[in-house]
Image (cartoon, rainbow, N blue to C red):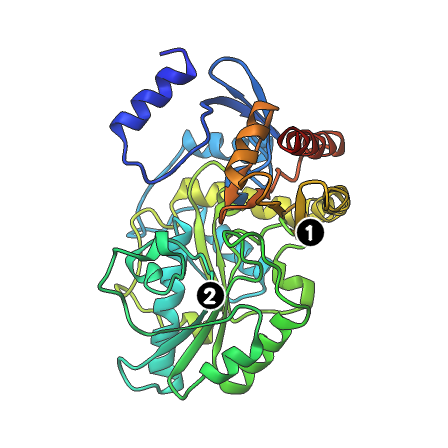
């Protein structure tokens, strides 16, 4: 096979249609740019949904992976290995937490946080067995396991997969009053995305995360922050919670933690929370494997310098300033923080999918969500020149639809 059409035809014929990808077949990549099977280059403005915060082929991350590949890739957690201690200590220090529990995918990390919160509720808070509830938000996206889709309000993720797991209360995102009204004696946690990515890069009102933190502390409830997409430099700080100086009880991490090389996820918390997990109660054969730890250690080292956070903050200001100039020219609203933006397209002009296809043809890869929104999240290593070029291509695409 050599052509885009051949690769797509076979892929569509032989795989489940659980995604609706753009019609591009990527062959190689470096930094913020990718190249397809026919040699065309594109600026990657999706970054694997923030998995590639540090760019394709980041030399420090790839170097760590290559070195580890030649020595040891897997032991299972039946044994210790020489990368694990640095991983646990490094990620714990980065998040300011005592302990780390590693998994692989983001959804696994969310499931881990749910299990830990329930067990903490029964053993520490004293909630009657089987009665714990967790408050979650409308329009959330935490993964697609059967438990997680049970509290999704997205019909595509939720409908047709019952019976659903009980124990969750869904409230309006951004409303502290909605959370306060939902709290009862059996509430063990509030699970929140500091910025809702899949919903269209929705940023909550100023002070919301601070209020959530204060309410959780007052009511003896765990605050669980899903920073899988928003964390690790994307928004201009290490974590999106940092913008309000908020420290949750539990961080849920993934995506960029694996540097775009291997799936790595984890939750971090203090010992009074994570200490409730005992041997045999939770785990994963591949969770915390040597290769994953070596890669994650390199990621943590990159974040320790603050260089990537500062770059995302500075380039994010440039991105949002240029995007706001398109409001009234095919763009209705721009939301986001750092190098992360949700751009609402005028629905009378085009859908988000149509704009994403047009951008692809102009050499920019982005992805739509919720009908009219295009998400932009280029790697933090993107140059300012390339970033502005991408926004100019968006303006060009919108002008074409307006004709």
Instruction: Report the disc number at residue 352.
Output: none
The residue lying furthest to the top in this view is 2
Residue 333 in the image, given as x and y percentages of width and height: 66, 51
Tell me which numbered mark, 2 or 1, is placed earlier along the sequence. Answer: 2
In the picture of the structure, the residue carrying the numbered disc 2 is 138
User: Split into 4 quadrants, where in the image is the N terminus?
Assistant: top left
Q: Residue at x 41, y 79 (%)?
A: 188
Which of 208 and 59 lies nearest the eye of the viewer?
A: 208
Q: Is residue 300 above or below residue 174?
A: above
Instruction: Report the disc number at residue 236.
Output: 1
Q: In this view, does 206 lie to the left or right of 369?
A: right
Q: Which residue is drawn at 36% across and 77% down?
A: 133
Q: In this view, does 3 lie above or below 254?
A: above
Distance (Cα) linking label 2 and label 1 = 25 Å
The residue carrying pointer 1 sits among few (fewer than 14), some (14 to 19) or many (20 or more) residues within 10 Å by Cα, namely many
For marks 2 and 1, give the one nearer the viewer: 2
- Secondary structure of the residue carrying numbered label 2: loop
Residue 122 in the image, given as x and y percentages of width and height: 33, 81
User: Split into 4 quadrants, where in the image is the C terminus?
Assistant: top right
């Amino acid at each position: 096979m050599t052509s885009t059409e051949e690769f797509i035809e076979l892929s569509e014929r032989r795989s489940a249609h659980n995604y609706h990808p753009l019609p591009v077949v990527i062959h190689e990549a470096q930094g913020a740019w990718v190249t397809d099977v026919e040699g065309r280059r594109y600026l990657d403005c999706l970054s694997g949904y923030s998995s590639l915060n540090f760019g394709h082929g980041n030399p420090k991350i790839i170097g760590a992976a290559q070195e580890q590949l030649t020595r040891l890739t897997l032991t299972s957690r039946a044994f210790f290995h020489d990368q694990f201690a640095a991983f646990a200590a490094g990620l714990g220090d980065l998040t300011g937490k005592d302990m780390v529990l590693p998994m692989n995918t983001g959804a696994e990390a969310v499931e881990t946080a749910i299990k830990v919160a329930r067990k903490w509720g029964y053993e520490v808070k004293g909630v009657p067995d089987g009665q714990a509830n967790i408050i979650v938000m409308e329009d959330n996206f935490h993964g697609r396991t059967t438990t997680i889709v049970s509290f999704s309000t997205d019909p595509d993720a939720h409908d047709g997969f019952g019976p659903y797991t009980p124990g969750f209360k869904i409230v309006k995102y951004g409303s502290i009053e909605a959370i306060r009204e939902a709290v009862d004696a059996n509430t063990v946690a509030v699970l929140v995305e500091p910025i809702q990515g899949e919903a269209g890069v929705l940023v909550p009102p100023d002070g919301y995360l601070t209020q959530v933190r204060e309410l959780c502390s007052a009511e003896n409830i765990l605050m669980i922050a899903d920073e899988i997409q928003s964390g690790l430099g994307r928004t201009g700080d290490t974590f999106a919670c940092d913008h309000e100086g908020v420290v949750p009880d539990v961080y849920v991490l993934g995506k960029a933690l694996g540097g775009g090389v291997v799936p790595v996820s984890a939750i971090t918390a203090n010992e009074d929370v994570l200490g409730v997990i005992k041997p045999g109660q939770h785990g994963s054969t591949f969770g915390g494997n040597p290769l994953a730890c070596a890669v994650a250690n390199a990621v943590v080292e990159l974040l320790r310098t603050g260089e990537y956070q500062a770059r995302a903050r500075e380039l994010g200001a440039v991105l949002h300033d240029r995007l706001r100039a398109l409001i009234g020219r095919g763009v209705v609203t721009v939301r986001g923080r750092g190098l992360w933006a949700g751009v609402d397209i005028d629905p009378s002009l085009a859908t988000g999918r149509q704009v994403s296809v047009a951008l692809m043809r102009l050499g920019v890869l982005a992805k739509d969500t919720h009908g009219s929104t295009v998400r932009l999240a280029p790697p933090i290593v993107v140059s300012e020149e390339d970033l502005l070029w991408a926004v100019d291509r968006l303006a060009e695409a919108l002008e074409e639809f307006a004709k």
